Image (tube, rainbow, N blue to C red):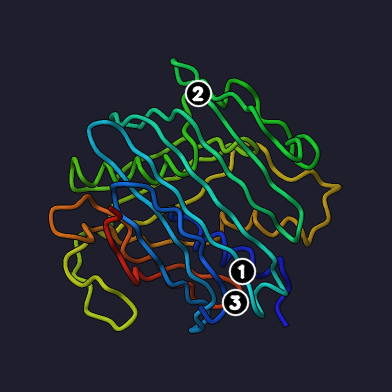
Amino acid sequence: MPTPAAARPALAAAALLMLTSGATAQEVAEPGGLMLVYSVHVGGLHVLDASAHMDMDDDGYHAGLSMQTEGILGRIARWKTDVRARGDLAAPLPRPHQFTAHGSWRDEPRLTTMDYTPDGTPTLTLADPAPEKDREPVPAALRQGTVDPVSAIVAVLDRVARTGDCDLTVPVYDGRQRYNLIFATRGQTVLEASSLSVYAGPATECTARYEPLAGRWKENRPRRERGGDNRRDTPVTLFIAPAVEGGPPVPVRLEADSNLGAVKLHLSSVRQPG
């Protein structure tokens, strides 16, 4: 049976989005925008669903992602997450107002809230456990000019909407780690119809690469708990397109590798909440 550390890169790849037989997804819909549900397959098996809400317009953005493991996967890798962000759209990067990440890994809570000052400085207003408990500190200078992980996905979606490409390096600080998400355009492609997806048609194909900078696990942290740092070795391909006619670009498919086999994420449903 695969270990939790082996499972975490697969989960991390799936959670790069903003992101059943093996899991449940709690709805994170809010009035307006799009309600998106993604099915996540690892090694050919449907392991979990992810529920996302995306609302982007001239007044700003609200976005969120919720998922948790259950069943067999839940027994070997107990994990749940609910992440949300809101802010203003701007080029080249959004201006977040608040980010929350509430979840747990192996029944250990991970609660984070960050608020942003008018100049964009992130202020950690809730952190349980404290980041310094198990991670190296992130220098204050590296936190400046950053966005949260959800706003990072909003940034690349807004880039595609404005320019048609996804060539963008996004500086990310999530309250515990500092890293870059490096997006690059691979080209335009056409996704064929599939029973796993509600979307077929033209899409922008992008690669995404994770570059860690600060906030690594401390050496005294058990190795089995440090599997998430393997994200740097997980190649990710992201396909972005409008899921509904006249709507904004959203992730419609994701592909990655992991120790457990190929990770594939498909858009399985989309609707506009009233």
Q: Quarter-wise, where is residue 52 in the image?
A: bottom left
- Give the residue at the far right of this rendering: 220
Task: Tell me where residue 39 appears, x and y as whole percent.
Answer: 43, 72
Q: Earlier in the sequence, mark 2 or mark 1?
A: 1
Task: Tell me where residue 68 appears, x and y as whole percent.
Answer: 59, 64
Q: Which residue is mark 2?
A: 116
Q: Residue at x 47, y 72 (%)?
A: 40
- Measured in 3D between alpha carbons, the distance from the residue under mark 1 to the one under mark 3, in whole angstroms, is 15 Å
Instruction: Tell me the kind of residue under disc 2.
Output: Tyr
- Measured in 3D between alpha carbons, the distance from the residue under mark 2 to the one under mark 1, in whole angstroms, is 31 Å
Is disc 1 placed on a helix, strand or loop?
strand
Q: In the drawing, what numbered circle is on residue 183?
A: none
> How many C-alpha atoms fall within 10 Å of the one at disc 1: few (<14), some, or many (≥20)?
many
Task: Tell me where residue 224 appears, x and y as whole percent.
Answer: 78, 62
Instruction: Tell me the kind of residue under disc 3.
Output: Leu
Q: Residue at x 39, y 28 (%)?
A: 95
Q: Which residue is mark 3?
A: 260
Dividing the image into 4 quarters, which one contains the N terminus? bottom right
**Who is closer to the viewer here, 135 or 55?**
55
Q: Nearer the viewer, mark 1 or mark 3?
A: 1
Confirm or deny contact between disc 1 and disc 3 (CB under 8 A): no
Q: Residue at x 41, y 35 (%)?
A: 86
Q: Is residue 195 left or right of residue 106?
A: left
Q: Which residue is mark 1?
A: 69
Q: Is residue 191 left or right of residue 227?
A: left
Q: Earlier in the sequence, mark 1 or mark 3?
A: 1
Q: Residue at x 55, y 35 (%)?
A: 173
- Measured in 3D between alpha carbons, the distance from the residue under mark 2 to the one under mark 3, in whole angstroms, is 38 Å
Is disc 3 placed on a helix, strand or loop?
loop
> Is the residue 146 above or below the residue 268 in the image?
above
Instruction: Tell me the kind of residue under disc 1.
Output: Thr
> How many C-alpha atoms fall within 10 Å of the one at disc 3: few (<14), some, or many (≥20)?
some
